[in-house]
Amino acid sequence: MKFVFIQIVFILFSLSLRAQEFVYNPTQNVPDVTSETIADRLAVSQDAKIDTLLKRHVAMNKRVNGTEGYRLEIFFSSSLRAREEALEVKTDFLRKYPDEQAYMIFQSPDFKVRVGDFRTKSEALVLRNRIKKTYPNAFIVKDIIQFPKLFITDRQSNE
């Protein structure tokens, strides 16, 4: 019994010494997929209305020119001088906070000034706390915001 056990251990030890080495070669045995995508090779059975709905969805998203998010509304008025007042508030805000965005919007019958482009309410709260002394009545509203700006570093542009 002891002899069998020693032989099994010896065999396992010798097999571990002969372990194979695998080298990954990405060009070996790769089918040519440049001319067709995976979706083209799949057989999908679906109602034609799904394609119509998908095309409508894409078209609506292209028209929106932004994404859902939050802004702070710091001014709204429907008085006779509402447009001039909104422009003054926007100019004053940009003078005090040049690093933020400000937008003057007309939604009948009000002129509104909204600031910031925030994806979450917590981001909007940070700005609200920062400006609450100057604009104590500022409140958070859902809005279509501009897409975030992408900054390309020198290193990325050289690649």
Image: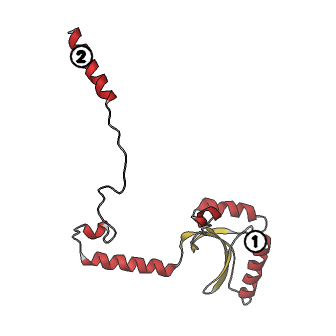
Residue in view at x 77 percent, y 82 percent? 88
Which residue is more in the foreground, 85 or 5? 5
- Which residue is painted at 35% across and 76% down in the image? 54
Report helix, strand or loop for mark 2.
helix
Where on the picture, by quarter, is residue 35?
Answer: bottom left
- Please identify the residue farthest to the bottom as the structure is shown: 80
129 versus 103 height, above or below: above
Determine whether, in the image, residue 45 is placed left or right of residue 85: left
Q: Could you say which quadrant of the image residue 159 lies in?
A: bottom right
Q: Which residue is mark 2?
A: 7
Q: Find out whether the residues at labels 2 and 1 contact each other: C-beta distance under 8 Å.
A: no
Return the x and y of residue 30 as percentages of the image width and height: 31, 59
Tell me the kind of residue under disc 1.
Answer: Pro
Q: Is residue 158 above or below residue 83?
A: above
In what element is the residue under mark 1? loop
Q: Indicate left or right for 30 with 130 as reference.
A: left
Furthest residue toward top? 2
Q: Nearer the viewer, residue 73 or 10?
A: 10
Q: Residue at x 32, y 66 (%)?
A: 33
Q: Which mark is residue 98?
A: 1
Foreground label between 2 and 1: 2
Q: Earlier in the sequence, mark 2 or mark 1?
A: 2
- Please give left or right for residue 148 compared with residue 40 in the image: right
Characterize the local packing of mark 2: few (<14), some (14-19) or many (20 or more) Cα atoms within 10 angstroms.
few
Q: Which mark is residue 38?
A: none
Left or right side of 67 for 91 = right
Assign the N terminus to one quadrant of the image. Answer: top left
Q: Give coordinates of residue 151: x percent, y percent.
A: 62, 67
Task: Work out how far the residue at label 2 is from the one at label 1, CA to CA, in angstroms.
Answer: 80 Å
Type of amino acid under label 2: Gln
